[in-house]
Image (cartoon, rainbow, N blue to C red):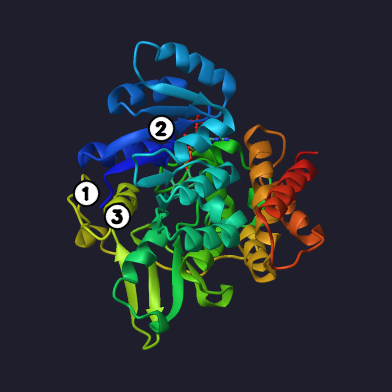
Amino acid sequence: MTKNIIVLGSTGSIGVQTLDVARMHNIGVKALTANRSIELLEKQAREFRPSLVAVADEESAKKLRIALADTDIRVAGGEEGVKEAASLDGADTAVNAIVGVAGLMPTLEAIRAGKTLALANKETLVAGGSVVKAEVKKYGTRLYPVDSEHSAIFQCLQGVPDKALKKVILTASGGAFYGKKREELVSVRVEDALRHPNWSMGAKITIDSATMMNKGLEVIEASWLFDVPDEKIDVLIHRESIVHSMIQLEDNSVIAQLGVPDMRIPIQYALTYPERLSSPVKELDLAELAMLTFARPDYDTFECLGICRRALRMGGLYPAVANAANEAAVSLFLSGKISFLQIPEAVGNAVEKFGGSGQNISLEDIIEADRETRRKVLG
Ligand code: NDP
């Protein structure tokens, strides 16, 4: 079980819940990082007393350095500071809860420093899966999923022989606009898209849920984590978010992991694996729920899901391109510059127009494809 952690992105939704788990089980916190939220970061630093706090935004780092001057906590700034935090001595596990591909380099730093990785930052695997997997193998480290669907699959796979896995079945809540058709999505507002039915999460992933890009990213993430191709990954709409995902075995038996929707269960499992410790999460009362429902996704209305599947099948840099176009388009949507349906349009165009690549891609190729795609989408 993990004894000391580094929390990358500690001020976000996953970061804060990770610190809840750390507080409950007396797990030491050696480093914390954020981008700009220095008020919360200062509060966290004063409570958990890490030896290093890193702030990606240099100006914010300067302010935090002054605020923490009465402590012995060191404050580092910029991307280099975040990388330093990711590889800090004295911690066995790095929890990566940064949003977006900004999490890729810290992930690699943590792996190269021999840390176990508890990975919430799905964009790391979507854009850089081949590089990350190669580094995990090279440095002999472990990677545990934090994303609830992937944690569910990981939990279901315990004790299952490798060859017995027939397919994985990812469940999806369907997001804010489930059941709607394209014409109803033309003029939806940012605040409508930010209203998720079951989960309280950061803004980017909430928009990704509304477009179903999130499920597309998760298909790619599952492919890297569990070594399964696109055709062995099913997606099933499950509005209640109680069944977090399933696996189907060669004999057609299906194993599922259930629980109330609370990220502290998968976060805790990634930190305590293979132990099962007590949790503040409520017990699941199936009789009270009475009914669980399942349906097929609407690929015509929520195009991002199909685009991600296509990008996965084409391989190489295509998933990185889809991810970069989405990150850029979501930021434009959140700032009111494009409409909701222009997000799938931007992702589809980027994948369609991308010139292609071989399958042997380097980290530099990924960074370049990411930068170039963002540049085109942001205009
Ligand atoms: P949030 O937006 O709530 O938090 C993101 C964190 O990353 C914040 O601490 C933020 O700092 C930090 N950050 C943002 N940009 C940078 C940067 N350039 N460099 C360093 N740090 C940065 O996101 P979530 O917690 O919702 O999601 C985090 C990741 O986990 C995402 O990849 C998401 O897909 C995944 N995930 C989230 C789930 C959830 O329930 N929220 C569920 C499953 C997966 P600051 O506060 O200063 O901006």
One can see residue 221 in this view: no
Q: Amino acid at mark 3?
A: Tyr
Whether residue 43 is situated above or below residue 11 in the rendered picture: above
Secondary element at image label 2 = strand
The structure residue drawn at horizontal position 46% and vertical position 17%, both measured from the top left corner, is: 64
The residue labelled by disc 3 is 269
Residue 346 as seen in the image, left or right of residue 96: right
Which mark sits nearer the N-terminus, 3 or 2?
2
Q: Amino acid at mark 1?
A: Lys
Q: Amino acid at mark 2?
A: Leu
The residue labelled by disc 1 is 282
Front one among 296 and 45: 45
Kindly report which numbered mark, 1 or 3, lies closer to the viewer in this rendering.
3
Secondary element at image label 3 = helix
The structure residue drawn at horizontal position 34% and vertical position 34%, both measured from the top left corner, is: 30
The structure residue drawn at horizontal position 64% and vertical position 52%, both measured from the top left corner, is: 323
Which mark sits nearer the N-terminus, 1 or 3?
3
Looking at the image, the residue that sits furthest to the left is 278
Q: Which mark is residue 212?
A: none
The residue labelled by disc 2 is 32
Quadrant for the C terminus, please: top right
Q: Distance from label 1 to label 3 (Cα)?
A: 16 Å
One can see residue 307 in this view: yes
Q: Distance from label 3 to label 2 (Cα)?
A: 20 Å
Residue 275 as seen in the image, left or right of residue 74: left
